[in-house]
Structure formats: structure tokens, C-alpha cells
């Protein structure tokens, strides 16, 4: 890895570390049904522990895999298959989830009607998703020429 690659992959390293933190957070809130309910899991999901654990831990594993791809693109771990298209997919997933922020804010400002105010614990994940999506897409575009091929 040349020195220029380190500066070009910095955002992908940050994305990886943030996504590991998100995976851990997801796993932790999944372990306690009342926490999962507070952070947006449906009441029916929290009543069926097998469903809560299956869905919550699956999302945590998905986030961990996202982090592995960010680390792979940054050169921290060996190259994984299809890095570039998967990074675009990861960016898109976070951005699409993050774009929910705009109608949520409009609903809270009573510009549109979504059935009432959106609680802050529903808005924060939208902000986080939008932030992660921006970091992933900008990091991917900056590092594009330095991302290993496999």
C-alpha cells in the first residue's frame, strides 16, 4: 500500500469503525426487549423473543459484514469479492434509510401528516443512516482507484 492510499481510504476506515460500533449497539439493544421496543422494534416483535433475536442479531451481523467491506476497501484486511459494487450497495442502503429523515422532520413541523409527531428515537436512526451513507459514498468515491480488485 502506498502512502497516498492511506489518505484516500481514511473515510472508509472511519466507516468501518463506526459500523462495527453500530453492529455492537444493535446486538446490545436486541438482548433487552424493552430497549428494542424503545428504539423502534414493533411490540409484536418484542413479544416473540425468537423473532426479536433472529431479526436483531441478523441486522447486527449485516452491519458487521458492511464493516468488513469497508475495512477490505481500506486495505486493513485482505480484499473481498465484489468490493466496489457492494460498497455502492451499502452506501445506497444507508442513504435510502437516511432519506426518511426529511419526511420525519416535515411531519414534526406539521408540514405533512404522517399520523402525528415522530419520536426522537425514530429520528436519530435516520440521522445516523444518512451520515453513514454520506461517509460510505464519499469514502468509496475518493478511494475508488485504490480499492483492490478481486
Image (tube, grey):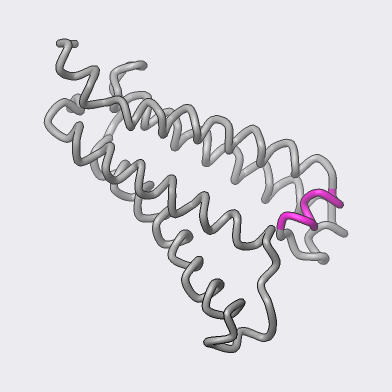
In the image, 9 versus 54, the foreground residue is 9
Q: In this image, 38 relative to 145: left or right?
A: right
Q: What residue is shown at x 72% (from left), y 55% (from top)?
A: 39
Instruction: Identify the residue at the far left of this view.
Output: 145
Q: Which residues are magenta?
A: 33-39
Q: Which secondary structure class fits the magenta region best?
A: helix
Is 107 placed above or below 129 here?
Answer: below
Residue 127 x, y percent position in the rendering: 51, 55
Is 80 placed above or below 122 here?
Answer: above
Q: What residue is shown at x 75% (from left), y 43% (from top)?
A: 29
Is 119 placed above or below 133 here?
Answer: below
Residue 6 x, y percent position in the rendering: 24, 17
Q: What residue is shown at x 81% (from left), y 49% (from top)?
A: 35
Q: What residue is shown at x 50% (from left), y 76% (from top)?
A: 103
Residue 66 x, y percent position in the rendering: 44, 37
Q: In this image, 30 relative to 108: left or right?
A: right
Is residue 150 visible from the viewing direction of this image?
A: no
Amino acid at each position: 500500500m502506498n502512502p497516498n492510499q492511506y489518505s484516500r481510504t481514511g473515510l472508509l476506515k472511519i466507516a468501518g469503525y463506526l459500523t462495527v460500533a453500530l453492529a455492537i449497539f444493535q446486538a446490545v439493544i436486541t438482548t433487552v426487549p424493552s430497549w428494542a421496543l424503545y428504539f423502534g422494534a414493533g411490540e409484536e416483535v418484542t413479544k416473540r423473543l425468537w423473532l426479536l433475536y433472529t431479526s436483531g442479531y441478523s441486522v447486527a451481523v449485516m452491519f458487521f459484514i458492511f464493516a468488513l467491506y469497508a475495512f477490505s476497501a481500506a486495505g486493513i484486511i485482505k480484499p473481498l469479492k465484489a468490493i466496489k459494487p457492494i460498497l455502492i450497495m451499502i452506501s445506497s442502503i444507508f442513504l435510502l434509510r437516511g432519506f426518511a429523515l426529511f419526511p420525519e422532520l416535515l411531519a414534526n413541523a406539521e408540514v405533512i401528516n404522517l399520523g402525528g409527531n415522530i419520536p426522537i428515537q425514530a429520528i436519530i436512526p435516520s440521522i445516523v443512516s444518512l451520515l453513514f451513507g454520506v461517509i460510505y459514498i464519499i469514502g468509496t468515491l475518493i478511494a475508488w482507484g485504490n480499492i483492490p480488485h478481486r
